[in-house]
Image: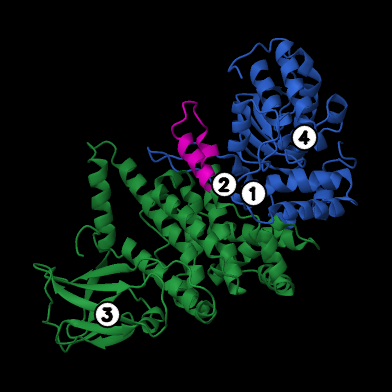
């Protein structure tokens, strides 16, 4: 997809050039340089060093456009390489997702506070919360880069991200900050660095929420639709444009598998932890008459695990065999539909695939639309 | 804490206007708001530590590291209708005046004679509106929320460390904080007072002002007002404001010793 999902021309600040992506990157480099001035680093400085280095990996190279910027990055690399584990140990000891969640509750309460709160203070607080979560996720990426896997922290940060996404409209106060960061982001990360790509997903949600807020604000002279209906319509339109929540969920799962694969040899030698429930995905045919269902394991046990996609009629959920013998593609992985109405892939092929959320039927090159199944139906 | 109190005993001062030195501006429109600013900025941690560096005579009035002493100072100010807070207010006025002069000399201001945002080399950001200073504080000294919460809760202690970087429960956070303290102490052992002011006052203020962008556009499509960080268009990047650069700027402002 050529479209840059981190840039929204629907948003006024982006459209009118109020954003400052160059300035944002320059400030990150300056911050990194400040940290590198010190011979010994405190845990907070180690945190900043590791997170900011990862942050700058996400940035389009054209934004790091001076010699000093590249020198600072090189110096940061050398500093990290000289003792990554001690830096990570002290930085990871600082991360407190629970305190972040409390802060989020405070932000939420500030909108309902009887005392009028300066919107500027709210915008600072909102931006700080976004940055704090982003930095913690980037620190985790840095840890994974050096072979440290902290599943507990990862789950806690996922919970933070879920809460941020669930309250994404609260962060409209910081939308120019978010839009500026969005403009700096590389769009090819999901092909090159899944872990890093996963840290950018929240910005898509924040931008989408900002679009909703602005859309509502811009039409406030018209009798407004019921808010629930407006949101449902909005999300339907966004899905048509390819900005789908299912795709996001799918990408996160693929990312999780990649990390799980790296740890499989270790996992085999250690006692098994609790297994997670499988995740189901559904693709709808262009005419809506059929759907394809794939069940992905919550906890993969082998890279060669076979994953089946079953095709069903929408009317009565019986096997849909009209595609028998045809080739289908899921991302780059290919298979033939069996006479019984299903086909199989290896999990490894799916995970290493580019755009793995895309199901294409090759005979007519039609793309089926990915959606999350309704848990109450489609069992 | 009551929302209003009698501050009639505090004598308000004036300072020269940074853009029109022949005219003057009052340091806060009324005594009550002046006292509130003393409480929220000069007597509230962690910003009070920066003010103790900015105002060398602060230590003669009270021990900034003693939270109870700060709280008692405020209680006394309330009891005396602001009279007892006059010395601290006068120190504050002097610091505001000097930082306004810095802003004028360095061109670190944005706005008009009527509405002006300015930054001085101590890291003091001040706003003049309708020919009165309406706020003057050191940005980057903790979140506004933390300061507000302490104010609302009538807390006597330091605000609780919190946020994403506040230490992971059940991990080695205590050891980490201990080690951090040692690192800071070693680093600061050779620092002059000016260096502490630079690292704990000025630089965090610039970092803060550069980090955040203007607030969201308002519902009617206009930007609500100019954010404080509009000043960042007038100040150099942090990489051009290192310790030696800052010393040069202080010399340009005639501040060879740390309080001119």
Distance Cα–Cα, label 2 vs label 3: 42 Å
Q: Chain of mark 3?
A: A
Residue A288 place in picture, x, y as percent: 14, 68
Per the rendering, the mark at residue B166 is 1
Could you tell me if the residues under marks 2 and 3 are in contact, i.e. CB atoms within 8 Å? no
Residue B126 position by quadrant? top right
Left or right position of A223 against A119 = left
Which chain corresponds to the colour blue? Answer: B
Per the rendering, the mark at residue B144 is none
Please say if A31 is above or below B20.
Answer: below
Mark 4 and mark 3, same subunit? no
Per the rendering, the mark at residue B51 is 4
Q: Main secondary structure of the magenta part?
A: helix
* Residue situated in front as seen by the camera: B20 or B121: B121
Residue carrying label 3: A308
At horizontal 33% and vertical 41% (from top left) the residue drawn is: A217
Residue B150 place in picture, x, y as percent: 63, 31
Task: Give the secondary structure at mark 2.
Answer: helix
Residue A168 place in picture, x, y as percent: 41, 49
Q: Chain of mark 1?
A: B
């Amino acid at each position: 997809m050529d479209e840059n999902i981190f840039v929204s021309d629907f948003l006024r600040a982006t459209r009118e050039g109020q954003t400052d992506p160059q300035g944002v990157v320059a400030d990150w480099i300056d911050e990194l340089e400040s940290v590198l001035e010190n011979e010994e680093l405190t845990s907070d400085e180690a945190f900043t060093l590791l997170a900011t280095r990862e942050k700058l990996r996400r940035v389009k190279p054209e934004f790091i456009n001076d010699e000093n910027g590249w020198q600072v990055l090189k110096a940061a690399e050398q500093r990290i390489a000289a003792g990554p584990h001690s830096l990570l140990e002290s930085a990871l000891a600082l991360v407190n997702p629970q305190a972040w969640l409390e802060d989020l509750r405070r932000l939420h309460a500030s909108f309902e506070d009887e005392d009028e709160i300066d919107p500027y203070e709210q915008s600072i607080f909102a931006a700080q919360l976004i940055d704090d979560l982003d930095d913690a996720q980037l620190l985790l990426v840095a840890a994974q880069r050096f072979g440290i896997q902290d599943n507990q922290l990862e789950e806690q940060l996922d919970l933070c991200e879920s809460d941020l996404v669930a309250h994404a409209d609260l962060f409209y106060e910081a939308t120019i900050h978010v839009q500026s960061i969005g403009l700096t982001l590389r769009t090819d990360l999901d092909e090159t660095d899944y872990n890093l790509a996963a840290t950018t997903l929240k910005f898509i949600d924040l931008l989408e929420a900002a679009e909703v807020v602005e859309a509502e604000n811009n039409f406030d002279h018209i009798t407004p639709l019921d808010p629930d209906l407006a949101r449902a319509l909005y999300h339907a339109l966004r899905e048509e444009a390819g900005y789908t929540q299912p795709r996001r969920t799918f990408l996160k799962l693929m990312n999780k598998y990649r990390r799980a694969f790296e740890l499989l040899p270790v996992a085999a030698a250690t006692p098994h932890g609790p297994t997670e429930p499988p995740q189901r995905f559904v693709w709808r045919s262009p005419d809506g008459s059929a759907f394809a269902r794939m069940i992905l394991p919550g906890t993969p046990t082998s890279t060669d695990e076979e994953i089946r996609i079953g095709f069903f009629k929408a009317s009565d959920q019986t096997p849909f065999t009209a595609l028998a013998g045809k080739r289908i593609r899921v991302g780059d992985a290919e298979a033939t539909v069996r006479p019984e109405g299903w086909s199989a892939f290896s999990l490894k092929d799916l995970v290493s695939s580019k755009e793995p959320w895309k199901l294409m039927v090759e005979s007519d090159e039609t793309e089926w639309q990915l959606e999350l199944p309704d848990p109450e139906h489609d069992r | 804490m009551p929302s209003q109190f009698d501050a009639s005993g505090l004598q308000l001062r004036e300072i020269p206007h940074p853009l029109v030195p022949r005219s003057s501006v009052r340091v806060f429109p009324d005594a009550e708001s002046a006292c509130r600013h003393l409480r929220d900025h000069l007597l509230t941690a962690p910003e009070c530590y920066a003010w103790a560096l900015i105002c060398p005579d602060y230590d003669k009035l009270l021990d900034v590291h003693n939270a109870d002493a700060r709280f008692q100072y405020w209680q006394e100010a309330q009891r005396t209708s602001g009279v007892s807070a006059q010395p601290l207010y006068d120190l504050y006025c002097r610091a505001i005046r000097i930082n306004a002069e810095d802003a004028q000399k360095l061109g670190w201001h944005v706005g008009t004679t009527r509405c002006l945002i300015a930054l001085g080399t101590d890291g003091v950001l001040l706003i003049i509106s309708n020919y009165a200073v309406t706020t003057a504080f050191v940005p980057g000294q903790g979140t506004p929320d933390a300061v507000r919460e302490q104010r609302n809760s009538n807390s006597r202690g330091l605000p609780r460390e919190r946020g994403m970087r506040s230490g992971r429960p059940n991990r080695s956070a205590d050891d980490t904080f201990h080690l951090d303290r040692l690192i800071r102490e070693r680093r600061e052992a050779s620092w002059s007072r000016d260096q502490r002011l630079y690292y704990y006052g000025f630089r965090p203020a610039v970092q803060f002002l550069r980090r955040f962008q203007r607030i969201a556009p308002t519902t009617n499509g206009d930007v609500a007002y100019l954010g404080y960080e509009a000043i960042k268009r007038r100040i150099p990047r942090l990489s051009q404001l290192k310790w030696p650069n800052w010393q040069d700027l202080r010399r340009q402002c005639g501040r060879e010793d740390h309080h001119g």
